[in-house]
Amino acid sequence: MSDTTSLRDLLLARLPGSGLSAEEQALLRDLLPATQSRSGARSGTVYMRSITASGWRGIGPAATVRLKPGPGLTLVAGRNGSGKSSFAEAAEMALTGDNFRWQGRTQVWKKGWRNLHEHSAPEVAVELGFDVGSDGEGAKEPVTVRRVWYGEGLEESRTVVEEAGQATGEVVHDVIDAEQLSLYRPFLPYTQLGAVINGPLTTLHDEISRILGLELLSDTDAAARARAKTLTDTENAAKALTATVIQELSEVDDPRAKEAITALSGRSPDLDAVRALLQGHGAADEAHLARLRRLADLERPDRPLIAKAVTRLRSAAAAADDARHGSAEDARQLIKLLDAALEHRRRHPDVSGCPVCGSTDLLDRSWAERTRAQVERLQTEAAEAEAAHRELVHSVREVHDLMRPAPAWLQADEPSLATLWRDLVACRTVRDPRELADRAERAEAVLGDACDQVREDARRRVTAQDGRWQPVAVRLSAWLGQAEAAQAAKPALKQVKAVRAWVRALTDELRDARFKPFADQSGQIWRLLCERSSVLLGAIGLTGVGPQRQVSLPVSVDDADAPAFGVMSQGELHSLALSLFIPRATHQDSPFGFLVIDDPVQSMDPEKVDGLAKVLDLYAQHRQVVVFTHDTRLEEAIQRLGLRATVMRVSRQTDSVVHVSSVSDPVSQALAEARAIALDPHLPPEVADRVLPSMCRLALEAAYQDTARRALREAGVGQHAIQERVTRPGPLTGLAALAMGIRGKEGREVLDAVARDHGPWARELIQGLNQASHQAPATPVGDRVALVDRTQRLAKEVLAR
């Protein structure tokens, strides 16, 4: 799967030759979703090293399933209720925080998640290995993702990421990318087998499309579809509004309304005529209304404030008159005269004559000192007159300041009122306090009353103007905006349709090319699972776009087309689900090197179980495939077909105590027993020399049987015939011949072939084991451990064929 960026580059590179116009190409670029940065999850192929659970589902005290972190098939078997599925669900819960078992279920289904016998806090954990090379041995430091519950609810949990037993502070998405976990989800519980095919085919279509890396195109088409809907809605809204406005206009007795109806009633409404009508209305009536609205909001001079200032002025004038006719005023006037004389003396210190009366030697130093002392005495006496004078000056200024000019617009809107306002302003030239008070008071009263009258008149006239036509004119203006939007939407909608057509064609092309390997893989899985079924599955495909998108599942029964779900048995439906799930979970771009499948055998007949064993073996060549099952038929099929698998047994005892034990394969078991005999110091030598060769021969028989089964199966021999041939009594060389594909050869020729493949030592080993197994050895075995080592070496090489 190409990532979004590379698909974006491909799309943009094809634009110049797309046949789209420049505007349509610009539209497509605008519709493209923004690029998204990749997650910072750890790199490398992820394998599982172990699954641990405690207090979880059917598991009480902590129990662990240990796994080899690399490609291979592991079968975890156990009866119903043993706790095997609890391990599968524990792994899913630890990494995803959810279980398919509970998706869409009520709370009743979630009540059994805690174990009834373990009272400590539940925990589930998965130890992961990250392989950055090709050896699959977990080249990077293992990481444990642990989910711990701190409350009673299923959702009351937290995750801890650990390395070397220590918390790293990371979250699970720092280890595994959440998007990839959703995209290539490597867990298939039994409950999901049915959901894969029972769910909406649109959902399955989208999930597969995401794997194909076409979400950029589907998102672009969705954005274009949304844009087209918006444009279409705009056109439809304009049409609906036209009918409504025409009805409203028909109810207005006004020539302009009739003109508007004519403009709106044509096949294509005359937008220019409507604009002209509204512009005329705006140029004339709106200017008039604007004048009236200004007058309606006119504010008169502030009467209370002016009245207060006039009262203060009159009081200040009276106080000034009283002071003027009293001794205080005389003192103030005398101070002025004496200050002037002192100023003259200061400016002319050498002149002592009086400039007023002409007396000589009068304004000397002694006179100046006496005069200054007199001024100081008179200042105290003149303070009252000075304060009255200052108050009068301030009062006059205050009244002048309140005589503000009229607004500039009033000159043109209401000239008569502007004249009255000028009379008010003229008061600013009056200096006499009493005259100023009287004129200000009269001017304000006349102007204020006039302002009130003009304002009320303007308000009445505005109300009269905003009659029945004004709302209709506003409605017509709104219609014009909608109609203009609809007019602009037409070419835009045409552009969107052209863009969608091109994106759909590109989607079909890339989808067919990218989906073919997926479809081929699903077909291969189906054929292995349903080798002898009368139901044939054709080439799976992705069809349709938008709401019509789905997964095509062409099915025929005895060459007659049939609906897939209607003619398939439950086993075939589960086989179909596996055929669709496995290619997704094992996609080449998936970082998950493991696949966890729970109870896939149910509802399958024996032939399909054999097919399932073949499918699992096929994918176990490059994946860590872990299968949980209670059905012994899968284990039997694996053994019968000579497939390699690690088998683990889960058993449950009282109080939910769960044990997991490894089940050795026949070769390993025979070698282990042989090595135990070789290392037993208490076993009499004559007994060891007699029993040990037989045990070693059993190990080689098991190895040759395993290899022979695989060779015969690859040669197309049926299962019944294979079982008969590999279990037929005979010399070890007969099994070796089957394994090497050299049927019909004499024992000596088979041994020569063994020597060519493995070396002379291997021929000598087989000869020695055959002889010792049928008669007492003439000579002691010698180094018993060395004999077991040679047997193990040959068995390993035979199994590796």
Image (cartoon, rainbow, N blue to C red):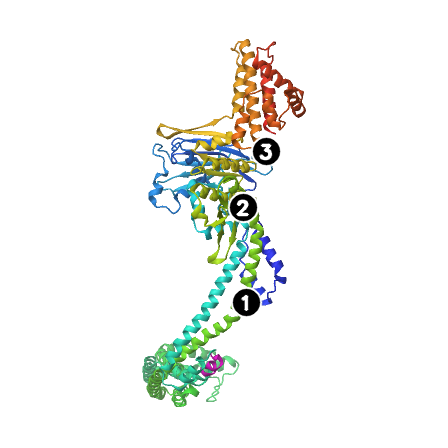
Decide: few, some or many residues near mark 1? Use Cα within 10 Å; few <14, some 14-19, many ≥20.
many
The question of residue 69 being in magenta is answered with: no
Q: Specify the segment rendered in magenta.
A: 269-278
Which mark is first along the chain, 1 or 2?
A: 2
Which mark is first along the chain, 1 or 3?
A: 1
Amino acid carrying label 1: it is Gln
Which mark is first along the chain, 3 or 2?
A: 2
Work out how far the residue at label 2 is from the one at label 3, CA to CA, in angstroms. Answer: 48 Å
Dots 2, 3 in contact, CB < 8 A: no
Check the image and report above or below for 451 versus 598.
below
* Circle number at residue 40: 2
Check the image and report above or below for 470 versus 81.
below
* Nearest-to-viewer mark from 3 and 1: 3
Q: Nearer the viewer, residue 278 or 134?
A: 134
Instruction: Pinpoint residue 355: horizontal percent, then vertical percent.
Output: 48, 87
Amino acid carrying label 2: it is Gly
Disc 3 marks which residue? 715
Query: Under tag 1, what secondary structure?
Result: helix
For the C terminus, give its image quadrant. top right
* Circle number at residue 709: none
